[in-house]
Image (cartoon, helix red, strand yellow):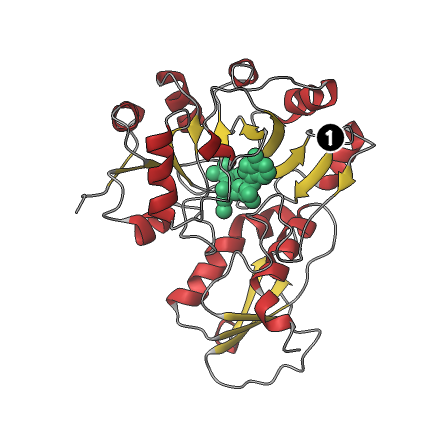
Amino acid sequence: MIQTLIGKSTEEAAAFLNEGQIIGIPTETVYGLAGNGLDTAVVSKIFEAKNRPYFDPLILHFKSLKAVNECVESFPTAAKILAETFWPGPLTLILPKRAIVPDLVTAGSSGVAVRVPSHELTLKLLQEIPFPLAAPSANPFKYVSPTSAQHVYDQLQNKIPYILDGGNSEIGIESTIVSFLDKTPRILRFGGIPTEEIIKICPDVIIDIQHAPNQHESPGQLEHHYSPNCILRPFSSTEYASESEKCVKLYFKKRADWQENKAEYFLSESGDLKEAAARFFSVLREFDAKKIEKVYFEWLPEQGLGRAINDRLKRASSNYNALG
Ligand code: TXA
Ligand code: MG
């Protein structure tokens, strides 16, 4: 059994990574489970620790746009403009991969997912190591993503030697993914950069978010994903009845008549989408910690980060949609 340390030392973190170990790292979106992205043996440790199927590829994290060039065959102009605009930041680009990138990282695809994260500690760490970091979100497959070192510890303790503690993730939801493998760029996942911002720079981008099972180009976009243990249902579709004290409501915005003891939760005090995104995953974890069984939620405005949060709510509640 490995003892898991939580600390703020990039030197210690780099030492573990240089030895071929995998560790938890902070990013502005969610925490990652990171290892040497150019070493197949290390990458397979990531899949194992996460219980993640090998068909679901990983994102490579780099210290700079320049460093990305070593792993990609080409960098289309539109992709470069997006990168220059949003990196470091919550944007992942899928670009044609070079042979140096192990097939395990891309699950056999000719495209590799790349991003430069915007987190001071992790950028420092990336400066101190001679390879990019392959890192999926540091949660067991299909569970809610972690937004603090404690979240990572709760689920991966004794599986990894170190978690680099960079505080709470500022954005709170994963990066937006844009693929440049075809002539027309495609948004494969809604995330931390709102679609509207991508369209401003890339007006021809199409939205290609997959919901149906069995046709996943971005397999992490499974129909049922981001799921806490509690059952989630939109309360527009069902009459909310207080079935038990283990049943709560989740609002976007704090209601004027809100009372702490009324089993009502909210994502943002003032109806701010950024605040809602930053709190979203930790609120879902809080429900599980409190053993809440059922959550009736309100959809957010379908704009900006609201679209990304709604996408995750849709997936987290998808098992139950069919039941009405
Ligand atoms: O914000 C983020 O992107 C976080 C932080 C840690 O960087 N990472 C993250 O990784 O969310 P993960 O593995 O949980 O989700 C990555 C998504 C998955 O849906 C995966 O299928 C997709 O990216 N993906 C990775 N490589 C791909 C590729 N080569 N082609 C298509 N989709 C890819
Ligand atoms: Mg994930």
- Can residue 165 be seen here? The reply is no
Position of 103 with respect to 321 (left or right) is left
Residue on which the image places disc 1: 182
Give residue 5's position: percent from left, percent from top: 23, 40
User: In which quadrant of this rendering is ligand 1 seen?
Assistant: top right
Q: Nearer the viewer, residue 179 or 14?
A: 179
- In the image, 78: left or right of 89? right
Residue at 56% of width from left, 17% of height from top?
65
Nearest the eye: 122 or 317:
317
Q: Is residue 324 above or below residue 148?
A: below
Using the image, determine if residue 269 lies above or below residue 8.
below
Residue 189, image x and y in percent? 64, 44
Q: Evaluate whether residue 30 shows in this view.
A: yes
Whether residue 11 sits left or right of residue 120 in the image: it is left
Other-residue count near label 1 (Cα within 10 Å), few / some / many at <14 / 14–19 / ≥20: few
Give the SS element for disc 1: loop
Q: Is residue 206 left or right of residue 280?
A: right
